[in-house]
Image (cartoon, grey):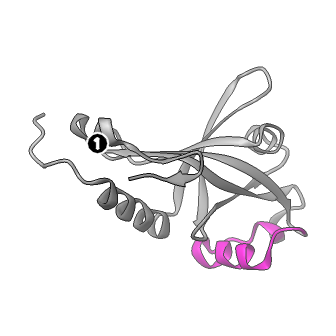
Amino acid sequence: MKITEPPRTSGQRKRELLDRLEREVDVWVATADREGVPCLVALWFVWDGEHLWLSTRLTNPTGRNLREGGRARLAFGDTRDVVLLDGEVETYTREEVPKEAASAFLAKTGWDPGRDSASYAYFRVRPVAVQAWREEHELSTRHLMRDGVWVG
């Protein structure tokens, strides 16, 4: 495969990323347990303009890893349009979750985890690092956020 498109600017990639966070519903969520055993699952998410909100059971490996580890790597796209987002995680029970977040989650996905089972919780992911690229020629400028601050 040949690279035929010019590389996107950081500003263009950031705009496309923010649009993607608004319109997409699923994200790959990578976590690890205390022993470093990885877990990778796809979950629904909602973007509130600053954080991604996820929901899963506290009792499954992903829920335990999110709660205990407090970190996650989220991934969108395929190998020709990659977005990697590293984030810090806070856990909210269905009683603690802000109403705006729960309402937005229901509006976007059609599912209310709080009504499903007591074992479901919400997880707020604050991005601290974001990378986005399509081809090799965008790799040198792939970092859009570092230490929680947008760059470029």
Q: Is residue 40 left or right of residue 152?
A: right
- Residue at point 79%, 78% (across, down): 99
- Where does the N terminus fall, quadrant-wise? top left
Position of residue 46 relative to residue 61, above or below, is below
Q: Is residue 94 left or right of residue 147?
A: right
Farthest residue, direction top: 35
- Residue at point 82%, 45% (across, down): 67
Q: Quadrant of residue 115?
A: bottom right
Near-viewer residue (5 or 149):
149
Residue 36 on image: x %, y %: 72, 22
Q: Which residue is mark 1?
A: 80
Q: Is residue 138 left or right of residue 130?
A: left
Q: Amino acid at mark 1?
A: Arg
Q: Is residue 55 left or right of residue 114?
A: left
Q: Quadrant of residue 64?
A: top right
Confirm whether the magenta stretch covers residue 92: no
- How many marks the image carries: the answer is 1
Position of residue 144 relative to residue 121, above or below, is above
- Residue at point 67%, 75% (across, down): 106
Residue 132 on image: x %, y %: 38, 46
Residue 137 on image: x %, y %: 21, 37
Q: Main secondary structure of the magenta part?
A: helix
Confirm whether the magenta stretch covers residue 108: yes
Q: Which residues are magenta?
A: 96-114
Position of residue 130 relative to residue 79, above or below, is below
Near-viewer residue (59 or 30):
30
Secondary element at tag 1: loop
How many C-alpha atoms fall within 10 Å of the one at disc 1: few (<14), some, or many (≥20)? Answer: few
